[in-house]
């Protein structure tokens, strides 16, 4: 049963992106532009499908969230390496934008590792939108050399990274699939209220036990 829950279509799609990453790097090193772009399109399409199918088929799991996050990371790295190997002139022209994008992408990851010991796996609405937008922007740059859309998407990715960073700071413990900072703030407030209620119940129990002991002491006298 446990194996059946693991071997799901969404998990297979996420794993496919991880498997395709080294293949794409090899294709880029060999100068196979068409094959690289075709397989990259398959990888990006699987990214759009895995989360949707997981919700549709009720096959969401912690493993699926982890695979999806690692698949995203491997795919983004592959896209940058592919741009560097296949279209070095475009890479050189957009180098500083790419470096800023990578830097902002790493910020919330480092913050989450420091605070929770794991990578962030929030899959915010903004992050999903950014993942959809990066594909056409990348192909427009690779095929036609127009960098405007890629720069705009990278700027949007920076805003996404800042939101994820804020989510890391506001949460008291690691959470998965947090749609936005507002949701994270509500989760944090709810957790604080629950902690406060637990403390109040504990104080009440202590008070009751103390009153019982005092009554027992008075009864003895």
Image: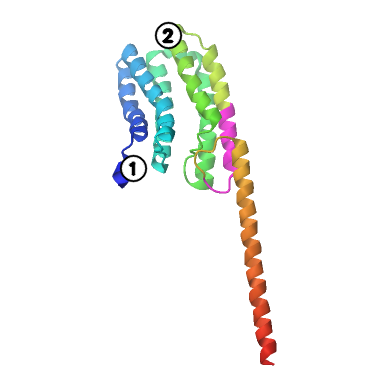
Mark 2: few/some/many CA within 10 Å (<14, 14-19, 20+): few
The numbered disc on residue 182 is: none
- Residue 111 or residue 184, whichever sits in front: 184
Q: Which image quarter: residue 83?
A: top left
Q: Position of residue 152 (x, y in %)?
A: 56, 17
Q: Quadrant of the C terminus?
A: bottom right
Q: Which image quarter: residue 125?
A: top right
- Magenta segment, which residues? 159-174
Q: Which image quarter: residue 27?
A: top left
Q: Position of residue 90 (x, y in %)?
A: 46, 12
The chief SS type of the magenta part is helix
Q: Residue sitting at 59 percent across and 27 percent down?
A: 159
Mark 1: few/some/many CA within 10 Å (<14, 14-19, 20+): few
Is 59 one of the magenta-colored residues?
no
Is 161 one of the magenta-colored residues?
yes
Q: Is residue 77 left or right of residue 114?
A: left
- 56 lies above or below 192: above
State the residue lying farthest toward the bottom. Answer: 221
Q: Residue sitting at 52 percent across and 29 percent down?
A: 127
Q: Secondary structure at mark 2?
A: helix
Q: Which residue is mark 1?
A: 5
Q: Is residue 32 visible?
A: no
The numbered disc on residue 143 is: 2
Q: Is residue 4 visible?
A: yes
Q: Position of residue 185 (x, y in %)?
A: 63, 42
Rounded to the nearest whole Å, what is the CA distance between mark 2 and mark 1? 41 Å
- Residue 155 or residue 16, whichever sits in front: 16
Q: Secondary structure at mark 1?
A: helix
Q: Position of residue 78 (x, y in %)?
A: 39, 24
Marked residue nearer the N-terminal end (2 or 1): 1
């Amino acid at each position: 049963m446990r194996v059946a829950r693991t071997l799901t279509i969404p998990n297979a799609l996420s794993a496919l992106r991880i498997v395709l990453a080294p293949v794409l790097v090899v294709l880029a090193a060999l100068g196979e532009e068409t094959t690289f772009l075709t397989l990259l399109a398959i990888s990006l399409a699987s990214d759009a499908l895995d989360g949707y199918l997981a919700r549709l088929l009720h096959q969401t799991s912690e493993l699926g969230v982890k695979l999806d996050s690692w698949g995203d990371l491997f795919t983004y790295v592959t896209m940058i390496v592919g741009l560097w190997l296949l279209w070095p002139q475009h890479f050189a022209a957009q180098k500083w934008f790419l470096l800023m994008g990578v830097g902002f992408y790493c910020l919330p990851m480092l913050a989450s590792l420091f605070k929770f010991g794991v990578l962030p796996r929030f899959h915010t609405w903004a992050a999903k939108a950014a993942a959809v937008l990066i594909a056409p922007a990348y192909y427009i740059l690779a095929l036609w050399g127009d960098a405007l859309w890629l720069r705009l998407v990278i700027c949007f990715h920076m805003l996404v990274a800042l939101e994820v960073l804020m989510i890391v700071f506001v949460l008291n413990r690691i959470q998965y699939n947090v749609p936005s900072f507002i949701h994270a703030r509500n989760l944090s407030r709810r957790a604080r209220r629950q902690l406060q209620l637990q403390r109040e119940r504990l104080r009440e129990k202590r008070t009751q036990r103390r009153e019982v002991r005092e009554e027992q002491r008075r009864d003895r006298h």
